Amino acid sequence: MQINRALIEPYKNLELLAKQVVEGFITGMHKSPFHGFSVEFAEHRLYNKGESIKHIDWKLFARTEKLFIKRYEEETNLRCQIVIDTSSSMLFPKESKENKLSFSIYAAAALCELLKQQRDAYGLTLFNETIEQHLGAKGNPAHFQLVFNQLSNLLENKKENLNSNPALALNQIAEVVHQRSLIIIFSDMFDSSPNEEKLYSALQHLKYKKHEVVLFHVTDKSKEINFEFDNKPYHFIDIETGEELKLNPTQIKEKYTQELITYVEKIKTKCGQFNIDFVEADINEGFDTILRTYIAKRTLMIR
């Protein structure tokens, strides 16, 4: 489901927007090659040859022509901790309402709605230089409203001049999330600390604590990765430090893109080594990648 910018603005209620995104996603799955693996996926798993046919859902078979085994509630519940980077770099592009932080909030809200529908427990952690807010994973309606209130408040009251230290924050998260969980991180992974090894160590720390981890690398791909600016002078201002630079982007494009791609590839490689899912999340695309990744990860965890 691609982002419909015209539809987002009228939705002052984040919960309504999340429901719209999830409904559109589920409808899309009905029409996709994954037909049959949609709203029922939390209650079923694919039948494996040789298993007892006692718990096959024949009604679902009639609709999908695929064999699914019914799951019971104790089999399907999982715990998910949604983690959002709130540092100032996430406010890029600053002149737009649809920046990296807004995208992350919308995506997190959609995930919460999907988690609620699956009766899974979920929590929310916000961080910049350190943990700013932490709500542990629960699954009751009051907690759902508390999480959405926090997301709505973050959407309306974005703070500036906040540096980022994901290495420190992720180490803290590894210690405060006590039960094995699916930890979903939304971050551009820009680190004010010059020591990249600390960041890799923090990611490894999460896996050491037996968590399953998905890192959504949130970027404005056209500007931040591809550095697509017109051939004219620009006045660049660092959102976190306030440092200013006047230049023509063509002067530094090759060096900038090379260094950034190298940095991102290092993180991606480390995630692969630690068995962490690294997923590119372009804010100019829709939320389908976010929701499909969650479904795939959830399916693996409850088998």
Image: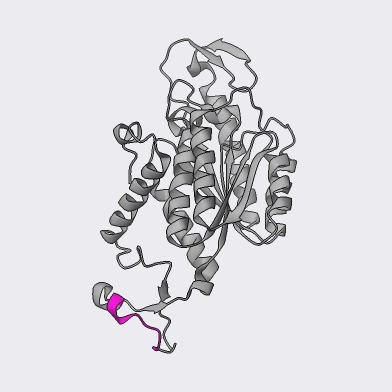
Query: For residue 55: magenta?
Result: yes
**Which residue is more in the foreground, 284 or 141?**
141
Q: Is residue 58 above or below residue 299?
A: below
Residue 126 at least partly seen: yes
Residue at 42%, 40% in the rendered image? 14
Give the image location of residue 119, x and y in percent. 48, 62
Q: Residue furthest front?
A: 142
How are the residues colored? one colour
Query: For residue 28: magenta?
Result: no
Q: Name which quarter of the figure residue 231 lies in.
A: top left
Residue at 59%, 19% in the rendered image? 238
Q: How many marks?
A: 0
Q: What secondary structure do most residues of the magenta stretch adopt?
A: loop
Q: Name which quarter of the figure residue 168 lies in.
A: top right
Residue at 45%, 76% in the rendered image? 71
Give the image location of residue 221, x and y in percent. 46, 34
Q: On the rendered structure, is 12 left or right of 31?
A: right
Give the image location of residue 108, x and y in percent. 49, 45
Residue segment shown in magenta: 53-60
Give the image location of residue 246, x and y in percent. 55, 10
Q: Name which quarter of the figure residue 179 lies in.
A: bottom right
Residue 100 at least partly seen: no
Q: Is residue 178 above or below residue 102?
A: below
Q: On the rendered structure, is 90 left or right of 211?
A: left
Q: On the rendered structure, is 229 left or right of 66?
A: right
Q: Is residue 182 above or below residue 106?
A: below
Q: Is residue 301 above or below residue 3?
A: below
